Every structure is written in C-alpha cells, then in structure tokens.
Amino acid sequence: MINFQYARANDVADAVRLITADPRARFIAGGTNLIDLMKEDVERPTRLIDITRLPLKSVEETADGGWRIGALVPNSDLAYHPLIAARYPMLASAILAGASAQLRNMASTGGNLLQRTRCYYFYDTATPCNKREPGSGCSAIAGLNRMHAILGTSEACIATHPSDMCVALAALDARVHVTGPAGERAIAFSAFHRLPGDTPQRDTNLQPDEIVTAVELPARGFAANYTYLKIRDRLSYAFALVSVAAALELEGDAIKEARLALGGVAHKPWRDPAAEAALCGQTANQSTFARAADVLLRDAKGFEHNAFKVDLAHRAIVRALTQATAGTPQSQSDKKIR
Ligand SMILES: Cc1cc2nc3c(=O)[nH]c(=O)nc-3n(C[C@H](O)[C@H](O)[C@H](O)COP(=O)(O)OP(=O)(O)OC[C@H]3O[C@@H](n4cnc5c(N)ncnc54)[C@H](O)[C@@H]3O)c2cc1C
Ligand code: SF4
C-alpha cells in the first residue's frame, strides 16, 4: 500500500497554491491516465489535487469569433457540442476516434493534452526507461518498437504522444491557456508538447507549478474540407499507428490553404510548415498530395519493428487529403455529428 494525500482545490488560485507547495503532488481530473500510472507504480504522487470542482467546464465564444474550451470539459461533451460539431468537425472526429465512450465521458480536455506515452517499457518498471527514470536507458530502441516514433526521435527516447484530440488541435492552430504563480500565459499548440531530445522525462513546456485552464480555438474551423484519419490495429479502442488531421481551403481545384498534422509518428503532434507550403497554390490531386507527403516524411526513420510506418504515413497522408478534398468525412460516427 502506497499512501498519498488528497486535497480538493476550491478555485484556480487555490490549485496553483497547492501544487506550488508540493512539487511531488499531481492534479487529478478524469483520472483515466493518472490512476493507471499510479496502479502500475509509474507515478507516485505524494498528494492528489482534485481539480474537478473548478469552474473550467464551459465552451465560450471569444471576442474574435473563436472558442475557448475549459480544461475540464469532458471529451464526450466537447465532441458532441453542437457548435464544435458544426464549426470544428475535424476536432469532434478526432476526439471520437479515441479511447471508448466510457473513457471519453471521464477524460478532460486538459488531461488529454497531458496524457503520457503508451510505450510498453514506460509502463513496465522492471525495464530501463529514460522517460520514467532519466539516465536509465531506452528499452524501446533495440526492443519492441512497433508503436514508436519515426520523426523527431532522439538517442534517449523514441516514444510517441498518444492523443488523437491533440493532432486536430495542432492542425487548427489552437492555443493553450495556463495559470501559474506568475499569472496567466498562453502557449501556441506547436510549442506546448516537446520533442524528447536529452530530456524525455519532460513531455510539455507546462511548468510543474502551472495548471491548464483552457484551450482556445481560432475562428477558422475548416468545416467544409477536412478529415481525421486514424490507422490502428483494431477499429476502436486502440491507439493510432498513424493518424492524419488534414484540412483544406479550396478555390475550385486550387488549394488556397492547407493544414496537415500527424499523430502516432512523433513525441508530439507532428505539423510541418514545409509540407503545408508544398500544398498551397497547387492543384488538389494525388501527385500534389504525394509531394507533400514526401516533404513531411523527408527525415523519417524507422526502427526494427516500425519501419512500415514510413510507407503507411505516406499513404495515409494522400488518402486523408483526398478525402478532405472530396469533403467526405472519415466514418459513420462523423456523419452522425455533422
Ligand atoms: C484503455 C484506454 C484507451 C485509450 N485510448 C485513447 C485513444 O485511442 N486516443 C486518445 O487520444 N486517448 C486515449 N486514451 C487516453 C485518454 O484520452 C486519456 O487518459 C484522457 O484524455 C486523460 O484525461 P483525464 O482527465 O482522465 O486525465 P487524468 O488522468 O486526470 O490526468 C492526466 C495527467 O494530466 C494532468 N492534468 C489533468 N488535468 C490538468 C490540468 N487542467 N492542468 C494541468 N495538469 C492536468 C494530471 O496531473 C495527469 O498528470 C485512452 C485511455 C485508456 C485508459
Ligand atoms: S521510448 Fe521513451 S518511453 Fe519508451 S522506453 Fe524509451 S525512453 Fe522510455
């Protein structure tokens, strides 16, 4: 039995005060990741700070026509929110591609951003893992690495970020609002998650004494031509081998603007401005899409068991952009929420 304390935060300032007072404390929201990590002895917080009563559960329009999503909005509520489903269907589609209905009912917006990798060795405390225990080594590089990264890896870690929602948020150019002892700040989504480098124990640029309060979506939702395509071992309840969030603004056959982000391939949602630039101003067809995929994957490198992901990602990008051009949602669940 490993003891820990429990405290309930009354407001955001109280949550920040409690976490600042104890660097080994952790916030708990839906608990769908943190509790598993505690059961596996990967996380051993001295104290759980329950943030579920904080007033961070609303979805509100911002002055510039975007939307501010409270950090405690459950994943299900967000996916089925009429405005999100209508204006940001790619985000709704990505959320519904993740986990199961029960998990999405519990999982929070903030917790989804901060969920940890699904690398098998990270969960197995009998094996070396630089992310869990810095300096101990990486068991995945020469081990079972089928689910692992092909882009942005380091000699210290080749883990992927497991979220679906975050891939769509990256493509939509969201911003993450956080509060800490020094006050509030906003972080561009592309700067929120980190590459592993030589500090794989740090997944994000959130400071240990900061709380995520909201995610802000800009006004543009790309609701006409979008796709979230998730390739996985089973059709549901499985993490992505490769996923693609693709959004286009078209003028006839010409691509005026393109957004492209990948999941399952890197330590963070992978968005590459050069690949998007390769699409802009071009005709929306297979050869344009294949060229953009070549650009995005130019530095991709597979390991013993995941080299197939490079080709899989290429084909997934072309397919996602083809579907986005046709204005075809990916699955039946998308059709229901449109
Ligand atoms: C079996 C299973 C399958 C899954 N499949 C998928 C999938 O296919 N795709 C997918 O995207 N996800 C999947 N998930 C992951 C799921 O989406 C996450 O577990 C969930 O989003 C985490 O949210 P939570 O509120 O439960 O976080 P918690 O478990 O409460 O917290 C997770 C982490 O975030 C921190 N935290 C939470 N809220 C805040 C905040 N506001 N500010 C600062 N820190 C905070 C906590 O301290 C903790 O470190 C799966 C999970 C399970 C168990
Ligand atoms: S890939 Fe990262 S998380 Fe997995 S064993 Fe290596 S260091 Fe740990």
Image (cartoon, rainbow, N blue to C red):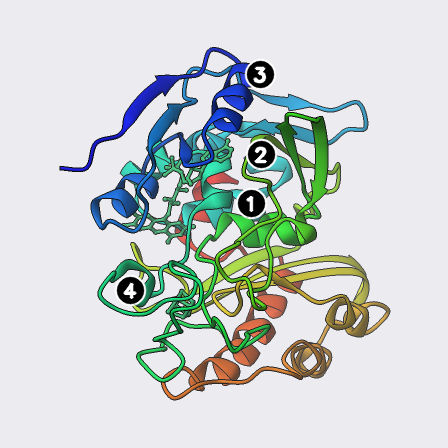
Circles 1 and 2: CB atoms closer than 8 Å: yes
Q: Nearer the viewer, residue 78 or 134?
A: 134
Disc nearer the start of the sequence (1/3): 3
Relative to 228, 31 lies left or right: left
Q: Amino acid at mark 1?
A: Leu
Q: Nearer the viewer, mark 1 or mark 3?
A: 3
Which image quadrant is residue 300 in? bottom right
* Circle on res. 91: 1
Mark 4–mark 2 Cα distance, whole angstroms, equals 27 Å
Q: Amino acid at mark 2?
A: Ile
Relative to 133, 66 lies left or right: right
Q: Which residue is mark 4?
A: 234
Relative to 323, 25 lies left or right: left
Which residue appears farthest toward the left when viewing the image? 1
Q: Secondary structure at mark 1?
A: helix
Q: Amino acid at mark 4?
A: Arg
* Circle on res. 24: none
- Quarter of the rendering occupied by the N terminus: top left
Q: Which residue is mark 2?
A: 84
Q: Which residue is mark 3?
A: 13
Q: Nearer the viewer, residue 334 or 129?
A: 129
Circles 3 and 2: CB atoms closer than 8 Å: no
Circles 4 and 2: CB atoms closer than 8 Å: no
Disc nearer the start of the sequence (1/2): 2
Where in the image, quadrant-wise, is ligand 1 located?
Answer: top left
Q: Can you say whether 96 is above or below 320 in the image? A: above
Circles 4 and 3: CB atoms closer than 8 Å: no
Q: Secondary structure at mark 4?
A: loop
At 63% across and 80% down in the image, what residue appears?
Answer: 297
Q: Can you say whether 301 is above or below 89 in the image? A: below
* Residue 318, image x, y percentages: 60, 75
* Residue 212, image x, y percentages: 57, 32
